[in-house]
Amino acid sequence: MDAPVPTTEADLDWRRAPRLLADRLGVSPTAVVMGVLGIVAAGIGAWWAFRPPSVPVEEVLPFVGDVGVSVPATTTTVPPPLVVHVDGAVTVPGVHEVVAGSRVIDAIQAAGGLTTEADRSRLNLALLVEDEQRVWVPRMGEDEPPVVAPSGGSSESSVGGGAVVDINRASPTELEALPGIGPSLAAAIVEHREREGAFATVEELLDVAGIGPAKLEQLRPMAGT
């Protein structure tokens, strides 16, 4: 049989501590032990809840210079102005500039407007003008001016369209009197009618290379068959 383990004074004090505390508080030793364990558990829980994170988390935000910003292009190509010669019954006859896509009324306004002598009944203010074109404004009772074919660009033309050009009989020089018809288009019209025969209607000018619907509308008031 094993010999009993000697008990020291310190062991006796440790073992007696719960009973002595229980007697002092007026509770059982088991309640004292459970209370101590509860306090220890609460301390461990508080430490776990408020412990610092093992790896600090940093939120990285991009700098303004690192973010690509798409800026829409605002540059637009502006077509060059048209240079036209406005002559006849206008306030300031001569060479004037108008923006691309302008019509006869814009060219007349650039020349200071019509005079009191202008024959308004012979004007077609809706015609489109082209670069190097001569716009002639007739006076009351004035005949059509003679055709002056330029060395390049469009020919001179009357805005009123009083003289109709027969596209089946006119020479290249006479065809250049039509608005928007220069030497190259006049030659193309002659070549087409010699190859395909006479034009039955003005609309058949659309078969000529270089003449589209907009150009046809310019020609219609002054072209005939």
Image (cartoon, rainbow, N blue to C red):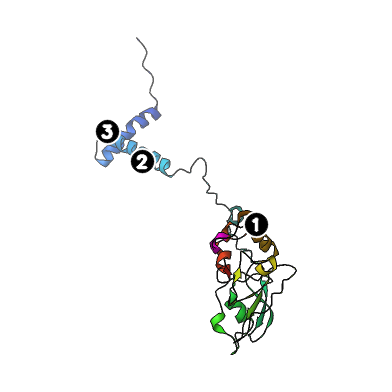
Residue under label 1: 194
Up/down of 142 relative to 72, above or below: below
Quarter holding the C terminus is bottom right
Asked if residue 208 is among those painted magenta in the image, a careful observer would answer: no
Residue at image point 37% right, 38% down: 40
| x, y percent for residue 133 | 67, 72
Q: Would you place residue 76 above or below residue 162 in this image?
A: above
Mark 1 residue type? Glu
Indicate left or right for 85 with 9 as reference.
Answer: right
Q: Which mark is residue 30?
A: 3
The mark that comes first in sequence, 1 or 2, is: 2
Please state the horizontal and vertical placement of residue 41, each as a whole percent of the image. 36, 37
The CA distance from mark 1 to mark 2 is 112 Å
Name the N-terminal-most of marks 3 and 2.
3
What is the span of residues highlighted in magenta in the rendered image?
Answer: 199-204
Q: Where is residue 155 drawn, in percent x and y?
A: 68, 71
Could you tell me which residue is drawn at 40 percent across and 39 percent down?
44
Q: Indicate whether residue 203 is drawn in magenta.
A: yes
Secondary structure beneath disc 3? helix
Secondary element type, mark 1: helix
Q: CA distance from mark 3 to mark 2?
A: 18 Å
Quadrant housing the N terminus: top left
Question: In front of the other: label 3 or label 1?
Answer: 1
Quick check: 49 left or right of 29?
A: right
Query: What is the secondary structure assignment of the residue under circle 2?
Result: helix
Of the numbered discs 3 and 1, the one sitting upstream in the chain is 3
Residue 42 bears which disc, if any?
Answer: 2
